[in-house]
């Protein structure tokens, strides 16, 4: 419908409310009688708890309860939700440690919850936390994933050999070994993908409310998947889902991090049960660095086999992936579910990947924007550049030679991806044109005169989005003909409300101002899996589309009945009796549907529809990023000068929001490549980056204008033709920036730059390279 | 945050009196360091004495060969001041690059100077521009004011009322921002007063310091080449996970040279 139609750059309906402070985040919510909780966290990476004395804390002013592991154990609540299903190398089940909300006998990372104080005010709870006396016996720790599975490494659990959580193998080992045996060139490299934190604008928070009279729990919290969350949490609480309500308000960013059921969720519910009053906990910014789950953190040993013409023959990758100290459902997924990205957009016939997931004395891990995709993209796209350098082939040319052409679609890659469509060479060419690839050497020479080392780098990455699954949507007309639209998806900043309203408006002809969007409350949302893995446009959007389709079908019958004809046409929100000038609007029909006299024989009253949409095939967003940057020869400071992206995310529902997604993703990718990193002290396991004074976040001033164009190749795997866009920006950014850095330094003989490429790291690389050449 | 008593000082004498009579008081200026410290429960003063209500402590004037900035003047006001921009542009530029907009609108020159944070910008401004720190009791030359890490010459009951910067023939401030915090990893103020040159460095060491070797070289010949080969020893400098002492030492040479380049 006109300006709000699918494909229009509609500005976000959410923004006026959110930007004026009208959002409803967890900390905005107050329930009468509410108490406040604070967590006592482990100050040690690994220690035995010899004793805990809570007597002083209990007696402190305003304190209503002090909970320790024993209280959790006695509550009837079980383990927090845990990962399951994977196996070890010998075929035995993965190691799944128990996961109580408060540590039992031992703490396993700095920040591990030990006790929970509930008091009248936050300040009183903080004071009381400081009065808890814990006697620790400090144990040796291991925080590095590379060291975690080494023989002799400190064990997190006595019965978990070498700290190995599980092993995952993928691809064809024999074929890959064969390819390597015949190869003319083998490129080998170890890549370290650093640990980062999501640093969401809204920190995590929860309010637990146990209603004793109804014997029912309500949790107001930050999440991504309300119904999945309820299912997992109900299992922990040992209650049927019908006795649990999960409510999410606005959510200020998540990027995967908030998708788990964290310790504090259990603690506010137990606190409420014990005190009979609602209990709120909201994470402070400082606390978030040691309390949140982190992302990435793995080491890849990768090899690419090539023939004499630069054609890829085989790819072999060994990954060590950090699991942190405990697992949640999804913690494991980053290690294996997106390895398909390693195959890239290339014809490489033989690939094998061997993944070992390792426990360490670090925060639990969660998917973080890309969840294995950026890691894999970094490995393959760096290898390709290394190969180009080694064989003396232009990076664009070596990619072009190896790309899967459209006529080979559908194409089964050497890993799990079975690609349905994509026009990779066209996208590459468009990107090269946009950045003026041919003119680069001139720009490099000009920069050199200013003491700047200019480099250009590209990446062509592909990932899976909208993994097979389902999503729900509901369209309800009220008596005035306005609409309540309910989705099982949960926006945490993406703008679902805007895009879903566009679909409804476009399909039903209802103005967006008359559509109320509702999500995230399990007492109101009937069906769905929630948001994650770049799935919502494809699955949630399709569900909305199907629901509106059902509405149109029913409304057409009602309209025909009312107009006294057999059939009506429907367009732009208007039903027309064929060959007459008699019409009814969608609103007319919706209002009429409340009255039995208007209904065809046997038809149910009302104009409502629910839809549960599912796909059996994922889609494959892909795109090319090209970066030009300059390194200050004296200081190692990096300035990005050009950044172009051509992406294929299928049908574009809203180009404005799409750009926002791409730019946001790029920011996080560039952040990781240039500055962000969670670091632990290798000796005592302390988090050395516990605030924004030490954890470097990218600022807007770091970025040049990011020039984004779309090359949509709609997919047939969902009815809208969309491919996921939420993670694409992040996936492409890491390797593109890395390749540009290496290119800028290539005249010094530099072939690789580790992340984060801080000014000092680059300065040292230049110093060492110059010293080596001198 | 722990509990504390809050006082709104009526005037400087009142603030000074409370500072000496109360149990464990702290002056609250802009609060840009103090408030986060309190929120993180890293300090627990018994009393906060807020200077925000003292009108005398705000404002900027040019008096003879000095720019006078009163203690409670926020950085943003210094940066935007037409008088400062005309008389001492290097100072306006320094103030305009402190922290972020929120910090610049709340943070004050008196608070910054009194805190002697090793990574703050104003100490380099004070020492480089031969400033005088004026308190309710005396006048202290900037060279004698900054004593060490968070340590100044301020005595009990002493409250900074203004900072008087000597207007140079020319001056320039350059800073390398910390990738995480935005504080100065290295900030260099170079100022020329007739035949005399001052080179003051903040961020790199535990306290602002002057580089006499560079000053002497520039006094001989005010040109970038004069200091191109002068290196500062990394031994007394600070390092963190982003920027080592060695790197900071290198940056001092680069930024001093660039400041001079910007002046000639």
Image: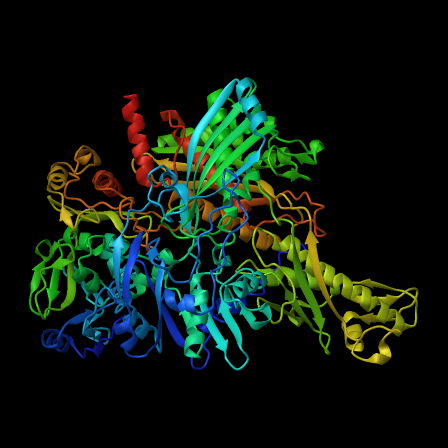
| B71, B203: nearer the viewer | B203
Corner quadrant of residue A606: bottom right
Confirm whether residue A702 shows in the render. Answer: no
Residue shown at the point (39%, 39%) measured from the top left:
A149
Image coords of residue A289 (percent x, y): 36, 56
Q: Please determine whether, in this image, residue A402 is positioned above or below residue A664.
A: above
* Quadrant that contains the N terminus of chain A: bottom right
Marks counted in the figure total 0
Q: Position of residue A638 (x, y in %)?
A: 37, 40
User: How are the residues colored?
Assistant: rainbow
Question: With respect to residue B33, does B259 lie above or below?
Answer: above
Q: Which quadrant of the figure has residue B133?
A: bottom left
Residue A663's place in the image compared with B66, above or below, is above
Residue B186: x and y in percent read 24, 46
| Image-based side of A624 in relation to B30, left or right | right
User: Would you say residue B109 is visible in this rendering?
Assistant: yes
In the image shown, does A539 or B141 lie closer to the viewer? Answer: A539
Q: Is residue A749 above or below residue B141?
A: above
- Residue B148: give x, y in percent of width and height: 12, 54
Q: Residue at x 43, y 52 (%)?
A: A326
Q: Nearer the viewer, residue B259 or A278?
A: A278
In the rendered view of the protein, which quadrant contains the C terminus of chain A?
A: top left
Identified at 81% across, 73% down, the residue is A604
């Amino acid at each position: 419908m006109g300006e709000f139609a699918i494909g229009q750059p509609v500005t976000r309906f959410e923004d006026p409310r959110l930007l004026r402070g009208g959002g409803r985040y967890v900390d905005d919510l107050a329930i009468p009688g509410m108490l406040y909780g604070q967590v006592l966290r482990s100050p040690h990476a690994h220690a035995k708890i010899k004793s805990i004395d809570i007597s002083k804390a209990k007696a402190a002013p305003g304190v209503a309860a002090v909970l320790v592991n024993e209280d959790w154990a006695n509550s009837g609540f079980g383990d927090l939700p845990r990962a399951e299903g994977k196996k070890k190398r010998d075929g035995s089940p993965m190691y799944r440690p128990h996961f109580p909300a408060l540590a039992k006998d031992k703490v396993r990372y700095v920040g591990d919850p030990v006790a929970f104080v509930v008091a009248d005010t936050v300040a009183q709870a903080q004071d009381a936390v400081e009065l808890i006396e814990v006697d620790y016996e400090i144990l040796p720790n291991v925080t590095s994933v590379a060291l975690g599975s080494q023989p002799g490494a400190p064990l997190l659990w006595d019965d978990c050999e070498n700290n190995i959580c599980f092993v995952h193998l993928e691809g064809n080992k024999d074929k890959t070994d064969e390819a390597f045996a015949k190869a003319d060139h083998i490129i080998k490299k170890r890549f370290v993908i650093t640990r980062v934190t999501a640093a969401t604008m809204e920190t995590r928070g929860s309010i637990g409310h146990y209603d004793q009279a109804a014997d029912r729990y309500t949790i107001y919290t930050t999440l991504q998947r309300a119904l999945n969350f309820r299912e997992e949490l109900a299992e922990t609480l040992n209650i049927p889902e019908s006795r649990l309500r999960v409510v999410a308000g606005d959510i200020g960013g998540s990027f995967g991090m908030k998708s788990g059921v964290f310790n504090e969720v259990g603690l506010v519910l137990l606190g409420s049960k014990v005190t009979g009053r609602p209990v709120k906990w909201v994470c402070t910014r400082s606390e978030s660095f040691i309390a949140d789950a982190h992302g990435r953190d793995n080491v890849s040993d990768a090899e690419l086999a090539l023939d004499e013409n630069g054609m890829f023959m085989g790819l072999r990758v060994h990954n060590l992936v950090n699991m942190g100290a405990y697992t949640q459902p999804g913690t494991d997924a980053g290690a294996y579910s997106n390895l398909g990205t390693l195959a890239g957009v290339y014809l490489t016939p033989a690939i094998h990947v061997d993944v070992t997931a390792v426990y360490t004395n670090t925060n639990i891990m969660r998917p973080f924007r890309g969840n294995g995709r950026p890691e894999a993209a970094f490995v393959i796209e760096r290898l390709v550049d290394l190969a180009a350098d080694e064989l003396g082939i232009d990076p664009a040319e070596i990619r072009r030679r190896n790309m899967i052409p459209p006529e080979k679609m559908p194409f089964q890659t050497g890993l799990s991806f079975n690609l349905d469509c994509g026009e990779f060479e066209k996208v590459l060419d468009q990107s090269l044109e946009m950045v003026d690839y041919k003119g680069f050497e001139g720009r490099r020479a000009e920069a050199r005169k200013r003491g700047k080392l200019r480099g250009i780098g590209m990446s062509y990455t592909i990932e899976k989005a909208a993994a097979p699954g389902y999503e729900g949507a509901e369209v309800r007309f009220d008596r005035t003909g306005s609409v309540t639209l309910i989705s099982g998806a949960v926006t945490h900043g993406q703008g679902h409300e805007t895009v879903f309203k566009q679909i409804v408006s476009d399909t039903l002809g209802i103005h967006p101002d008359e559509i109320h969007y509702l999500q995230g409350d399990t007492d109101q949302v009937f069906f769905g899996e929630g948001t994650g893995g770049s799935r919502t446009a494809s699955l949630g959007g399709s569900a909305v589309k199907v629901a509106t389709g059902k509405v149109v079908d029913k409304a057409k019958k009602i309209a025909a009945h009312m107009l006294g004809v057999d059939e009506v046409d429907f367009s732009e929100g208007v039903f027309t009796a064929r060959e007459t000038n008699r019409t009814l609007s969608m609103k007319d029909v919706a209002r009429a549907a409340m009255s039995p006299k208007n209904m065809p024989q046997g038809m149910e009253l009302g104009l409502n529809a629910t839809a549960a949409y599912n796909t059996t095939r994922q889609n494959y967003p892909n795109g090319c990023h090209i970066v030009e940057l300059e390194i200050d020869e004296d200081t190692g400071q990096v300035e990005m000068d050009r950044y172009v992206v051509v992406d294929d995310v299928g049908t574009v529902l809203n180009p404005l929001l799409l750009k926002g997604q791409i730019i946001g993703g790029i920011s996080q990718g560039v952040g990781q490549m240039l500055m962000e990193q969670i670091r632990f002290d290798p000796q005592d396991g302390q988090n050395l980056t516990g605030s924004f004074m030490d954890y470097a976040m990218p600022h807007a001033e770091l970025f040049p204008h990011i020039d984004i164009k779309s090359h949509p190749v709609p997919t047939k795997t969902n009815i809208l033709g969309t491919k996921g866009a939420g993670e694409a920006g992040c996936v492409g950014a890491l390797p593109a920036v890395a390749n540009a850095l290496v290119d800028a330094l290539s005249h010094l003989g530099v072939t690789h730059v580790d992340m984060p490429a801080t000014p000092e790291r680059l300065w040292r690389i230049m110093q060492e390279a110059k010293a080596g050449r001198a | 945050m722990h509990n504390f008593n809050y006082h709104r000082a009526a005037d400087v004498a009142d603030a000074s009196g409370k500072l000496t009579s109360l149990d464990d008081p702290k002056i609250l200026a802009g609060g840009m360091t103090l408030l986060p410290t309190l929120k993180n429960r890293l300090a627990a003063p018994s009393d906060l004495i807020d200077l925000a209500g003292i009108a005398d402590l705000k404002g900027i004037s040019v008096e003879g060969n000095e720019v006078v900035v009163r203690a409670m003047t926020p950085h943003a006001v210094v940066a935007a001041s037409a008088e400062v921009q005309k008389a001492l542009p290097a100072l306006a530029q320094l103030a305009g690059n402190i922290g972020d907009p929120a910090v610049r609108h709340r943070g004050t020159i008196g608070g910054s100077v009194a805190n002697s944070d090793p990574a703050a910008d104003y100490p380099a401004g004070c020492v480089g521009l031969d400033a005088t720190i004026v308190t309710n009791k005396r006048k202290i030359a900037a060279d004698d004011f900054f004593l060490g890490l968070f340590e100044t010459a301020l005595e009990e009951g002493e409250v900074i009322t203004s900072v008087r910067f000597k207007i140079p023939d020319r001056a320039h401030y350059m800073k390398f921002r910390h990738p995480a915090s935005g504080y100065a990893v290295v900030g260099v103020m170079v100022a020329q007063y007739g035949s005399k040159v001052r080179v003051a460095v903040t961020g790199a060491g535990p306290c602002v310091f002057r580089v006499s070797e560079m000053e002497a070289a520039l006094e001989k010949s005010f040109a970038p080449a004069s200091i191109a080969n002068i290196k500062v020893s990394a031994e007394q400098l600070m390092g963190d996970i982003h920027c080592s002492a060695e790197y900071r030492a290198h940056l001092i040479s680069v930024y001093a040279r660039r400041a001079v380049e910007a002046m000639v």
